[in-house]
Image: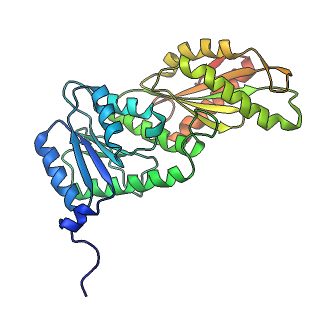
Amino acid sequence: MPSDEPRAGSLSARLSATRRVLAIEDDPDIAEFLRAYFRASGYDFVHEDPVDADDGLAAIVDHAPDCVLLDIGLRGFSGLEIYRRARAVPSLALTPVVVVTADGTVRERTAATAAGIDGFVTKPFNVNTLKEVVAQRIEAARHLGDSGVIEEGSEVLTAAVLDARLADEIDLAQASGTPLTFGIVGLRTKGLGADAAAVRTWLVRVLVDEARPRMAAEVALARTSTDELAVVAPGSTPAEVARWLEPVLAELRRPRTLPGGESVTVELAAGLAGYPEHASEPDGLYMAADAALAGAAESRSLVAVAL
């Protein structure tokens, strides 16, 4: 008996397309090839050749794709500029981006190796592999979306999204040859009583509200526990992050009035670790930053960099 599933390339497949792929690509021949292939495979496909990063970001916002195919080498600028701007928009935090690059050192990530939201393929690419990575990344983003992207009542990423984001940023740092810094900011208070966890959660939200405007848009903040925040700073070394983070923490390190009227002094410290000098995978960066945080707390320093 004939299958009810639409044949690849059939009109019914195109009309039933529910997933949209946006290709940001400056080569019209590649774009047309991708258009034909993805439309035949049941995807809605759109193509943009932006003039700059802002134009590329506008395309993502306007088309609201389920996945973005992003070429690194665009006309006069890097596709990573678009990526950075998109990831700074909370509503785009889980939009998968499959980075297409001519850098042969970048590994292709499949279901067995993918830890994040994004995928990475190299030119010349196998179009079947590309379609597989797109499908996997869309599914991964939907799965992460079920657990929430932004912590309720705050502007920080959830722990699950942080893990995915950090894995992606490490791959992007490798692809672009740029540094990456991961940090843990610890909050310490005493005498909070039985409601200590709730008070610390409130304090973290207050600190985030005050710290966010003092940080570059590409810096991501995430919650790791009731009294810790993670900082992901792409394109910066630990020394560079320490220079701007220290005065931010110094300004935030002051007495606070709790909702009940009680005053409490907030002690802050941060530990920083960098890719690739301290670690080349997420767990290694966590451990190195945590060790640096312990060193900062012990020496009563605001910021310490991993050894």
Q: Is residue 11 visible?
A: yes
When asked about the image quadrant of residue 273, the answer is top right
Color theme of the render: rainbow
Q: How many marks?
A: 0
The one nearer the camera, 260 or 271, is 260
Q: Is residue 173 visible?
A: no
Q: Residue furthest left?
A: 29
**How far across and down, in percent of the image, does residue 3 sit?**
27, 80
**How far across and down, in percent of the image, does residue 190 sit?**
84, 26
Question: Does 72 sit above or below residue 302?
Answer: below
Residue drawn at the location 23% of the way across and 46% of the way down: 46
Question: Does 76 sit above or below residue 250?
Answer: below
Q: Quadrant of the N terminus?
A: bottom left
**How far across and down, in percent of the image, does residue 64 sit?**
35, 43
Q: Is residue 161 left or right of residue 25?
A: right
Q: Quadrant of the C terminus?
A: top right
Residue drawn at the location 48% of the way across and 36% of the way down: 90
When asked about the image quadrant of residue 244, the answer is top right
The one nearer the camera, 233 or 90, is 90
The one nearer the camera, 303 or 2, is 2
Question: Does 248 sit above or below residue 137?
Answer: above
Q: Is residue 248 left or right of residue 43?
A: right
